[in-house]
Image: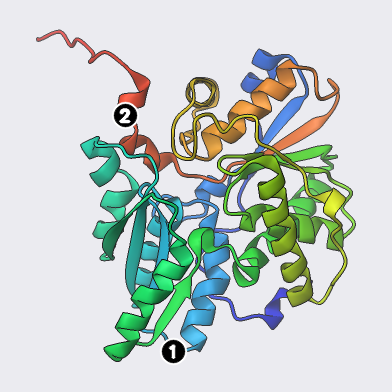
């Protein structure tokens, strides 16, 4: 777990805060709920991908890259953070955006993360959400740039490979150190899981230091067997990279995919309700794609009595609040009436 052995460029504001959510805990009447504020990592409003990008962008620099290419859904938090990190490091950025929702809403297609992609100077091209292998598609585009003489470094969707997952193996150590300093016994760690890198890194880190903190990923895309398989396979590779092969077993990987709804990037009623609850009780912004669905799962599990009243549950906030500006139509608010002076 000696992370200084790996190239890293320090971009994130770390450690992120670990805070109690007292009003939410009181409202739900269950365990005490805490939040790990990885929405506050810096770099273009923050988010979980910045931890991964510290290792990925350092690898790109070490290879002399003058262009990074990545891919994601239209309102990709990862794409936005990659564009921001590339801008800070003086590396060009090109993004492939996959249309996974079929939305024609101008806000969805041009606002939120998409607007910030362009603000950071990235270029982009779209792909239909028709079952394409987006990482393979990205490599095809990368080869075209290489043929033009560019030194290209490609980053998979979500930054989710063993290099990127190092960021969350390291975050596991950060979280446990904070809890030890605070005298906080963490009984369960919960977060939204999608491209698998966050959950894979966390489970490797937690197991490697024998933290004995159960980890639950609330799925936002794939069915449970596929999500758990993706996380486990990446965890195995990440553990090998860290020099602790075999530290993770298949039984260590748990995902609950009951809160996906109609599909990735499509808001759910419970997810929107969770966003409103966090905003109105704690002043914290979630997003409809990842953290909102993760929070919906957390809230529902608390209400179902899945946790004892004296437990401490930590919700890892993976960020993404800027995506709200791409989903304004989902909230169905009447325009406020303002009295003229």
- Residue 170 position in % (x across, y down): 70, 63
The kind of secondary structure element at disc 2 is helix
Q: Nearer the viewer, residue 324 or 224?
A: 224
Residue 59: horizontal and vertical position, in percent? 54, 80
Mark sitting earlier along the chain (2/1): 1
> In the rendered view, would you say 168 is above or below 32?
below
Q: Position of residue 140 (x, y in %)?
A: 38, 75
The quarter of the image holding the C terminus is: top left
Residue located 68% across and 16% down the image: 28
Quadrant of the rendered structure where residue 177 is? bottom right
The answer to whether one can see residue 21 in this image is no
Residue at the far left in the pictured view: 341
Res. 137 image quadrant: bottom left
State yes or no: discs 2 and 1 in contact (Cβ < 8 Å).
no
Which residue shows up at 31% across the image and 44% down it?
112
Report, in whole angstroms, how far the alpha carbon at label 2 lies from the one at label 1: 40 Å
Which SS class for mark 1? Answer: loop
The answer to whether residue 189 is left or right of residue 195 is: right
Q: Residues within 10 Å of mark 1 (few under 14, many from 20)?
A: few
Q: Is residue 177 above or below residue 287?
A: below
Q: What residue lies at 32% left-to-right and 69% top-to-bottom?
A: 94
Q: Image point 72% across, 49% down: which residue?
A: 228
Per the image, the residue denoted by label 2 is 328
- Give neighbour class at mark 2: few <14, some 14-19, many 20+ (Cα, 10 Å): some
Q: Which residue is mark 1?
A: 64
Return the mark for residue 252.
none
In-front residue for pair 151/223: 223
């Amino acid at each position: 777990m000696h992370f200084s052995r790996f190239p890293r460029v320090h971009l994130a504001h770390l450690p992120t805060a670990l805070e109690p959510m007292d009003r939410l805990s009181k409202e739900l009447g269950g365990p005490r709920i805490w939040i790990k504020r990885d929405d506050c990592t810096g770099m273009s409003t923050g988010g979980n991908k910045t931890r991964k990008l510290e290792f990925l962008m350092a690898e790109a620099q070490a290879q002399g890259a003058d262009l990074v290419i990545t891919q994601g859904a239209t309102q990709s938090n990862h794409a936005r953070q990659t564009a921001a990190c590339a801008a800070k490091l003086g590396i060009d950025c090109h993004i492939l955006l996959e249309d996974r929702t079929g939305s024609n809403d101008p806000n969805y297609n041009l606002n939120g993360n998409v607007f910030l992609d362009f603000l950071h100077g990235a270029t982009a091209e779209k792909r239909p959400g028709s079952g394409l292998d987006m990482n393979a598609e990205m490599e095809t585009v990368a080869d075209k740039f290489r043929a033009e003489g560019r030194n290209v470094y490609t980053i998979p969707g979500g930054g989710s490979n063993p290099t990127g997952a190092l960021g969350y193996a390291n975050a596991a150590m950060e979280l446990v150190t904070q809890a030890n300093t605070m005298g906080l016994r963490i009984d369960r760690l919960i977060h939204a899981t999608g491209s698998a890198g966050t959950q894979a890194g966390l489970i490797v880190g937690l197991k490697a230091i024998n933290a004995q903190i159960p980890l639950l990923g609330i799925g936002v895309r794939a069915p449970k067997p596929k999500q758990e398989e993706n996380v486990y396979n990446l965890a195995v590779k990440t553990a090998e990279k860290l020099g602790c092969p075999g530290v993770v077993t298949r039984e260590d990987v748990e995902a609950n995919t009951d809160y996906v709804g109609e599909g990735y990037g499509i808001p759910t009623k419970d997810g929107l309700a969770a966003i409103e609850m966090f905003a109105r009780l704690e002043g914290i912004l979630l997003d409809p794609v990842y953290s909102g669905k993760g929070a919906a799962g957390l809230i529902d599990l608390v209400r179902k009595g899945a946790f004892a009243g004296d437990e401490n549950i930590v919700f890892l906030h993976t960020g993404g609040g800027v995506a709200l500006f791409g989903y304004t139509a989902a909230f169905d608010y009447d325009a406020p009436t303002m009295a003229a002076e």
